[in-house]
Image: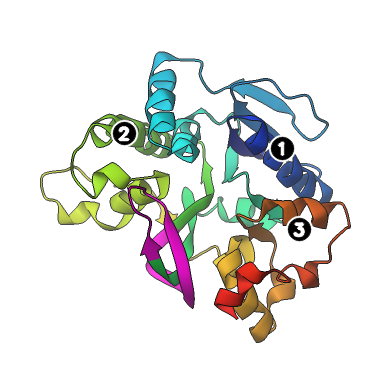
Amino acid sequence: MENGVIYCAMGDAYIDQVIVSASGLKKHNPDLKVALFSDKEVSHKNIDINIDILANHEARRVYKALKESDRLPSMKLMILHRSPFEKTLSLDSDTYVRGDISYIFDKLDEYDLLFTPSEICQWTERENSWRYDVTKFLAFSDEQQINAGVIAYKDVKLVRNFFEHLIKTITPILNSVDNYLEKFNDQELINFYLYHYKANPDVKDHLEGINWSSTVLDNKIYNATDRMWPALQKEGTWKDVKILHTGLVHYLKELHEGRRKYSKLTDHKYFDTFR
């Protein structure tokens, strides 16, 4: 099948985010198909395929556990191996595509699996939560940490096996009393496998044979989190961003509807931390 983008959204708020994200995607990449994995069917001109995310017992069990522990965004791990596309881009619902992203799919001719690096920030841990608050932006790229909001891959057996293994790993983590593991989310889990797995001689490296990279896709272009925005503006590369990623999702809707200008996205007190 053709190239496409997949989203995971449970609940109306996240579905609304996906519609905005997909609208930006289609505006600049009209030939890309969009598949939405959700607990409800969504009829919208920019959603091409609806897939029931809770179609099997394993997905329903994980959904229940993640919801109870306030980690529902990590359901994205349950859809990666189910993509209907030959080449897939997985996007978080709080992203917005504002340019041609064909480069990502072209690079999948050379690679099986692509991530973008995470930015480097100072973080403050929230009490009794896996969530953290950022207190300072430090640098654009962390060579030992990926951001799971943007993942590109092609339909090959080794990659499917890797994603399926991530799902199998969820159960013991959800039941763990270990202080680190009990706070896991999808990003923590993927980073564990990418950068720490080889340090454990008792565990098979499930990435063996997969041609993957976390440096081919520049996060300054293809996964610009809002923490980076003021720094991108300062260095003059703000105009080059093609995928925005922000928790201030109402900004993205205003941007798409023309009620807010791209150059003015940081006009919010939230960004005072990063100026």
- What segment carries the magenta color? 124-146
Q: Which residue is mark 3?
A: 98
Q: Secondary structure at mark 1?
A: helix
Compared to 1, does 150 lie above or below?
Answer: below
Helix, strand or loop for the magenta stretch, by majority: strand
Please tell me which of labels 3 and 2 falls first in the chain: 3
| 49 or 268: nearer the viewer | 268
The answer to whether residue 140 of the structure is visible from this angle is no
- From the viewer's perspective, is the residue at label 1 or at label 2 nearer? 1
Disc nearest the viewer among 3 and 2: 2
Q: Which quadrant holds the N terminus?
A: top right
Give percent across and percent down for residue 160.
Answer: 42, 34
* Type of the residue with mark 2: Ile
| Quarter occupied by residue 168 | top left
Distance Cα–Cα, label 3 vs label 2: 34 Å
Q: Position of residue 221 (x, y in %)?
A: 63, 66
Name the residue type under label 3. Arg
Which residue is denoted by mark 1 in the rendering?
Answer: 16
Mark 1 near mark 3, Cβ–Cβ under 8 Å? no
Assign a secondary structure to mark 2.
helix
Is 168 included in the stretch rendered in magenta? no
Work out how far the residue at label 1 is from the one at label 3, CA to CA, in angstroms. Answer: 18 Å
User: Against 186, is 78 above or below?
Assistant: above
The amino acid sitting under disc 1 is Asp
Residue 13 as seen in the image, left or right of residue 182: right
Residue drawn at 81 percent across, 54 percent down: 254
Residue 128 part of the magenta segment: yes
Task: Determine which residue is flagged by label 2.
Answer: 170
160 lies left or right of 93:
left
Which comes sooner in the sequence, label 1 or label 2? 1
